[in-house]
Structures are given as C-alpha cells and as structure tokens.
Image (cartoon, rainbow, N blue to C red):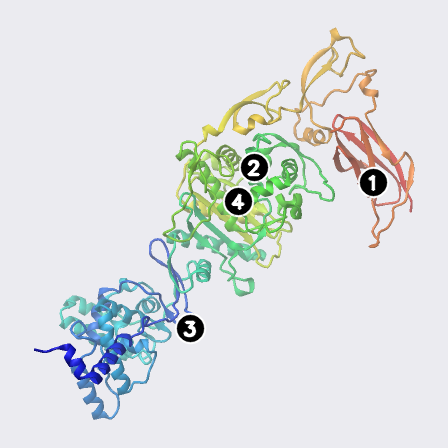
Amino acid sequence: MFSLKKHIVNHKKKSILLLILLVWYYFSLPKELFNNPTSTIIESKEGKLLGAKIAKDGQWRFPKQDNIPIKFKQCIVQFEDAYFYKHIGFNPVSIVKAFAQNLKSKSIKRGGSTITQQVIRLSRKGKRRTYFEKLKELILATRLEFRYSKKEILQLYAQHAPFGGNVIGIEAASWRYFGRKSSELSWAETATLAVLPNAPSLIYPGKNQLRLLKKRNRLLKKLFIEKIIDKTTYDLALLEEIPQKPYRLPQIASHLLQKIDNEHQGKFIKTSIDYNLQNQVNAIVKTHYNVLKQNQVYNIAVLVLNVKTRKVLSYVGNAPTDKEHQKNVDVINKPRSTGSILKPFLFAAMLDNGEILPNTLIADVPTQIASYHPVNFDKQYSGATPASKALAKSLNVPAVKMLQQFGLERFYHYLKKLDLKDLKYNANHYGLSLILGGAESNLWDVSKSFAAMSATINHYDDLQAKYYTNEFIEPSYLANFKADYGKISTQKTLYDAGSLYLTYKALKEVNRPEGEENWEFFDSSKEIAWKTGTSFGFRDAWAVGTTKDYVVGVWVGNADGEGRPSLVGVQAAAPILFDVFDKLPSSKWFEKPYDELTKIPVCRKSGYRAGNYCTEIDSINVQITGLRTKPCPYHHWIHLDETEMYQVNASCYPLGKMKHTSWFVLPPLMEYYYKKQNPFYKVLPKYMKGCTSESKKIMDFIYPKAHTKLFLATDFNEKKNAVIFRLAHNIANAKVFWYLDKTYIGTTQQIHEMPIHPKTAGKHIVTVVDEFGNEIKRIFEISK
C-alpha cells in the first residue's frame, strides 16, 4: 500500500523541490494583473455617456465593467480561440501547429496563443515574443485558469486588449470607432472590433482598410458556418462599411467631467444628470453665447437642481467659448461678486426675526453712512417703499437700510449657516456693502441655498408642520445619492417656513425680462420665485429662480472679470433662466404653511402692524414672529382748527372748536421724495400762528458758531480735511437730515456729528431738518 509520508521521507530532495515548485506556481501570478491608469468616464442617470477623459498615460482605457456583450464574446472566441471553453489555459494542438509553421518559415508567423495566454502577455506589458517567454506565459495561463472563471478571463481580455492607436479595451474601441456602447453594436461592427487586437499596430480603422475588411468578413463567415448568425444576418453584415476614422468621445458635460476627474480620477461615475435636459441647456447656453459675445461677454454658467432629491440635473460650467476666453474654467464653483443676489436671504431673516412685515415701509432716500453712499440702480428714490416691493425691484438703498436695522453680524450669521464658502472674512471686513455685492459667492452655493429654502417649505407641509434638522445639505451629482435630511423636529433649521413662503411670494412678483412681462395672464405660465443680481462695474450678472421642484442658477460675465455695459442680471442672465425653466416640467406653487402664518391687522399705508391711529386696515397673513413687530410709527393723532387748514393746540386755540384726526406723516426727507410719486399723500398742515410749538427751539448747533470763518487743513496726502459740524437736539433719538448748500449729504441719529466737505472757498450754508419738520441753518465761510 502506498504511503505518502514514507514516500516523502525516502525522496526528501524531490519532495522539497516539488514543494518549492508548487509554492512558486501558487504565487507566480500577481494578485493584481493590471494596474494601468484608466479614463474617467461619466454617464447620465439614463446610462448614456456624457463624457470621458483620457487616462494619465495617454490611452483611452475605460474602467473595469462587469459585463461584456454576448456578441463580442462569441466573435472573439471564434476568431482567437475556438477551444477557449475546453482548454486549461493553452491549446497543445495550436502550439504544435504554430511551432511547425514557424520552424518551416524560420520566423514567427503564427502565435498559437489562447485568449488566456494573451491576457497573461498583456499583463506582462510587451515582453519579447521568444519561446522561453511563451513557456512562462503557458505556465501562468494555467495558473490564471485556476484563479478566474472563463467569464472573468474574457472580461480581462476585453478590457485590456489593444484596438489600434491609443485605444485599449472593447468599450473604448466601441465609442472611438462607432460612437456608441459596445452592447448596441451590430454583428458586423462587433466582428470588426474582434479582429483588431490580432494585429493592432497594423490594422485599425483608417489604415489598411482592405485587410481589415477581409479579416472581418472571414470572421462573419465563420459565425455563419458555426450557425451563430443566420444567412440574412450574414448577408446584411457583409454590406456594412467599416469605420474610416475614430469618433470624438462625447463631451456633453465637459466641466462636470473635469470636476469629477479631480475628485474620482480614473473611475466610472454614473451621475444624476438628465441627458435630454443637459443637451437642451447646452443648446440654450450656446444660443445666448452667440448673442452675448457680440458685446464681448464670453462666459456663462448654468446649474439645475432637483429640490426634492437635491441632485444635479444639469451642469454647464461655461459657454462654448475659446481658450483665449478661458473656456476650460468651470465658473460654477468660482467666487464672484454677488451683486443683489443675497437680498432674499436678508428679507427672509428679518421676517424670521420679527423685524418687519412683508409690506413694512422702508426708507428709500439719499443715504450716506460714514463714507458709504449707496445708490439705487436707476439713481431714483421713492422716499419710502414696502419691503417686499424693495426686494422685487432690487432697490439698493432700502436693502442697506434694512441691513443696518437688522445688524451686520446677525445677517452674517445667517449667511454662514447657509454655508456660503467664499465668505472668508469677518462681517466688518464687508460692512454694509455685503448686501450689494461687497462679498463673493459662487453659483453652486447660492443655488443650493435656494434649494434648501424651497425644501424647507415643502417638508413643512409633508411633515405636517415639522422640520428636518439637516435641511441645508450639499447637493450631489451622483446618481445613487440619497439625501440625509436628519431627524424630524418641531424647531426650524434656520428660517421658518412662513418667512420663506412670504419671501418667495415677494420674489414671484419680480418684473420678468422682455417677452415674459405678462406671464400671469397665461394658464401655461410657470410660477417662479426668482432674483437677479448685478455686481459693481457690470462684471457679474446673476439670476436664480425656484419652483416647488426645481432650482435654476445662472451666471453670466467674463471669467477674467472684465465688465461690460450689458452685464445686468435682468438683461443677460434672466432670459437664460426662463429658457431653462421652459424645458422643465411644470410645478404647482408652494403649499401655504398655515401653522407658521397668522392673520393680523396691518396698516394699509405703512405695512406696519396696525396701531391705535391707523384708519385703513387690512387683515393679512404674516409670519408668526410678525406679532412682535412694532406698531405703525407713521400715523399720528393731530389737532386741527375748524377749517382743517392748521394744526393747533391748547396754547392757541379753544379746545371745544378743535377737530381731531389721524394723519399719515412721513419724516421730512422721506416725505420729500414720497409725495412726488404719491399724489394723494397729504402733507401735515403747519401750526397756526401763535401756537407755542412753532417758536419752541428744540435743536441748535454746537459747532461752528454763526458766520465763522474756517480754514481747511491739509493732510500728508495734500487732501483737504473736513469740518465736523456738531448739533444738539432735545429729543434723544431724533433723526436729523443734513444739507450743504441745498444738497442732501447725510442723516444722523443720537450723536449728531457730520463731516462737511465744501468744494470751494467762500460762504456756504448748512441746513438741518429733523424728522418733525423743525429746521435750522448755519452760515459759515471757508478761507482760501
């Protein structure tokens, strides 16, 4: 009886040698056969190729794919290795035939390699084709057969076989030579690819066409003989032409490809991009680019987000411009001056904190705050305007007034919570210009913030008056992305749903661009809350809009920062925004968040919570925090004489003859501009002569004295210093409006100090008017 132990003892050397050979054989095959760099590939959510970036070694080599088409399997087996499914890595018959033929011709004419051996040779990266190397390949091929299944070996071959030029692998070859997936190829096309690895350096489309055609047809004939294809298929396949030159791979989302290549280099990424929408947005951008470039505006970026899933549906990082105008720059994530695009965030924050109601009157008058002098885009003033109208018309002065009232630090806190990543400095660095474009942000962050606010309203309705704790998340371009909104809570994340709903209601009233003006009269029109922005110097034009389901963000400008006269949000960016929305499905308007709204009496003229003296009152829905807003400050109880021509009091008129009424009174400077645009505004009557209020002096100048001659000192830069005028007022918190030679120069409150800069020598007059209509003047002289 045979004893293995006894045999090993009796043949120690042979046993040790055998063990060494077995260990060598086991470890002879590397764990990783191929570690070549691969191309970065991105697909749409439907599985269509959006773009590909060549691998680092300059080869078109797609990442590993789990399956290869059945047609290619059959073609490659019939052409390269008919006994593939029967051998253990090599075919002795083929080797003997190849050896005999090569010996007879005294050169290598035939290889005799199986597909398994060819996989080994490909993994060893071009070793010389000698008999010794063939022996190594043979041994390694048998080892490969033990490690992998036949299916896996075919996959390795299909992925790493050369197909001519710098094309590696079946999928790259299919796109380069036929412009579509390998699974969509005909028998003739698949056969063409199957014969290419046999001699890739000699035969590839565009070179040696006749030899390629003969090889393909020979393979098709074999497929017919083996009854893999029928006679009709065979005859039709012979009629198909072979490709003449390689196709360019699709570049439908080139800037997204660039972004993904930086984050997932060499990977196959299925994105959330909607293939048809991406093509439509590309076409829209191209159309507008062809118009805008006539005015030397060369760059456009568009981002479309799904509010519910927070996925990217379309990503156009730039216009189809040229290298000179930085066509490869992805503008979507680049910091740009925000212009007015942040105003909705301030409006919502003030509603959220109970600072204003939607139609609270905001001062719209010439304003100077220290050295900062904001002006409206049209350089006109309305005196006072409802907050919602100021937002819809994007008025600058009211926005600055609102930011000053709300507090710079408080608003900055909201922006940081929105995770606007380009806000890299503290609030004081930006100052009040923060609301007018003094800061920078990017299209990605602004769009995602609108998506989060829209979702807050949607979720409040879905969750029956509750919120998610993680509403303000980053969007994703990945198809398998699942948004994690956190836990359900009764507490708001940042803004309450009522404030956001009222903000969007105001933004729905923004005047639309040419061609969209009468949208509300058409049933097919879409209700969109949207906002534009224009940066200082006409360098950036923004438009961001949202429906219940989608957010569209648009930026237009020049990547190098050059300004152009036409770079205005409503003219350059808004038309693109509405063209994109036209391609999106219609959405219902946001559901009203009733539990975050309440009806309160509001003064019709001022928009404030109705006070005791308001005569015209509306009951409207406002945010819950609106209950703590202050009552109307502009309606006063006044006393008139019998003719109602003068104000009177007990010092000058009998009480029994007085008439008492409520009067809507704005401060002097607001009134001056307001009454020009509001013809029904009634100016408060003057006091009757003899009434003490007329003669009572409640303010006076501290410095300078009347008819003083002043000398303006010069600083180190040869610049004239200002004269600081100081004023005392009996009412501690009174507002005072300053004029130099009848020109408005600023407003003070509490501390009444004003720097005066006369441009010429000689006599000048400073006039001061307080909010109650009291006026004083000071004449002074500047020495030469």
Per the image, the residue denoted by label 1 is 724
The image position of residue 361, as x and y in percent, is 63, 30
Measuring from the top left, give residue 603's x and y in whole percent: 60, 23
Look at label 1 and name its amino acid: Ile
Residue projecting furthest to the left = 1
Query: Sequence order check: which comes first, mark 3 or mark 1?
Result: 3
Give the Cα distance between marks 4 and 3: 41 Å
Marks 2 and 4, the one that precedes in the sequence: 2
Q: Is residue 678 above or below residue 189?
A: above
Q: Nearer the viewer, mark 4 or mark 3?
A: 4
In this view, the mark in front (1 or 4) = 4
Question: Can residue 623 be seen from the camera position used here?
Answer: no
Q: Quadrant of residue 718?
A: bottom right
Earlier residue among tags 1 and 4: 4
Q: How many angstroms separate mark 1 from mark 4 (CA)?
A: 41 Å
Quarter of the image with the N terminus in it: bottom left
What mark, if any, has residue 256 been given in the picture? none
- First in residue order: circle 2 vs circle 3: 3
Residue that label 2 marks: 349
Indicate which disc residue 418 carries: 4
- Measuring 43% from the left and 58% from the top, which residue is drawn there? 253
Alpha-carbon distance for marks 2 and 4?
12 Å
Q: Residue at x 74, y 6 (%)?
A: 656
Residue, disc 3: 57
User: Can residue 472 be seen from the camera position used here?
Assistant: yes
